[in-house]
Amino acid sequence: MDCHTPLVLPSLLAADFANIASELKRAETPEVKWLHLDVMDGNFVDNISFGPAMIEAVRKNSPLFLDVHLMIHRADHYLDRFIKAGAGNISIHVEANYDTSVESTLKRIKAAGISAGLVLNPHTPFEAVVPYLHLIDLLLVMTVVPGFGGQPFMEKETMPKLTAARDYREAHGLKFHLQVDGGIYVNTAPIARKHGANLFVCGTSFFGPKNTPQTSKDLAASVAF
């Protein structure tokens, strides 16, 4: 898949954890190829979600590509555990603390034979990720403050950075995906699409409605241009 093809990614954080097996099946619609998994440590963000054991369980029970978003400090320390668990892509935050560095962590992810992503929070300037853009396969521009689902889409703070990332990518002949996460619904996803996004993480908007097949079609249609 190239960096211009739009794709909807259900976010497991919004699923019913008491029925996780059936929720994974709900995500397997014709429009969905990737599943997004948010790992939170209660330190980098003020919430705790799940760790490598959940990634491994999902890997065993889902055919979808696993897009793992590490909202944690010291991602380099824990990295091998997530690689072993079956992640297809691992994204790390430019703002987080590392025992080594952002650059070396991205290189380790690539060396493991999986794709590497970098994440930018809403209030972090685009310039913070520029030194690493040649190393990545995916840039995630957070469209809410990370940590909790159900927040409103921060258009004013984030769309200029998404545009800047798209323009930089094209000017330098790079091919990384542009992903957005937070407040993504049928009315906000097209805004991000117009500013360059091709990967759309949908949590509450995907798992909230009961008619999942129709929801999946509607979300995919909203970015199909």
Image: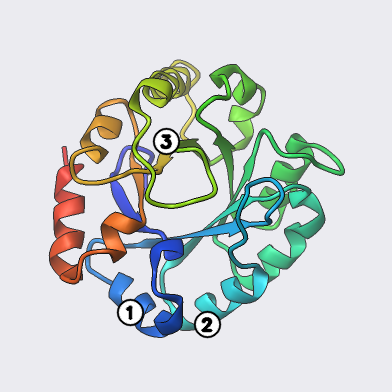
Q: How is the image coloured?
A: rainbow
Q: What is the three-letter code of the residue carrying label 1?
A: Lys
Q: How many marks?
A: 3
In space, the residues marked 3 and 2 are separated at their CA atoms by 30 Å
Question: Circle 2 sits on which residue?
Answer: 60
Question: Circle 1 sits on which residue?
Answer: 25
Horizontal and vertical percent position of residue 200: 34, 46
Residue 103 relative to residue 225: left or right:
right
Residue 94 lies, with reference to residue 147, above or below; the image says above
Q: Earlier in the sequence, mark 1 or mark 2?
A: 1
Q: What is the three-letter code of the residue carrying label 2?
A: Lys
Quarter occupied by the C terminus: top left
Horizontal and vertical percent position of residue 209: 21, 65
In space, the residues marked 3 and 1 are separated at their CA atoms by 27 Å
- The reply to whether callout 3 and callout 1 are in contact (CB within 8 Å) is no
Label 1 crowd (10 A; few <14 / some 14-19 / many >=20)? few
Label 3 crowd (10 A; few <14 / some 14-19 / many >=20)? many
Q: What is the three-letter code of the residue carrying label 3?
A: Thr
Q: Residue at x 30, y 65 (%)?
A: 207
Give the label on residue 143, or none. 3
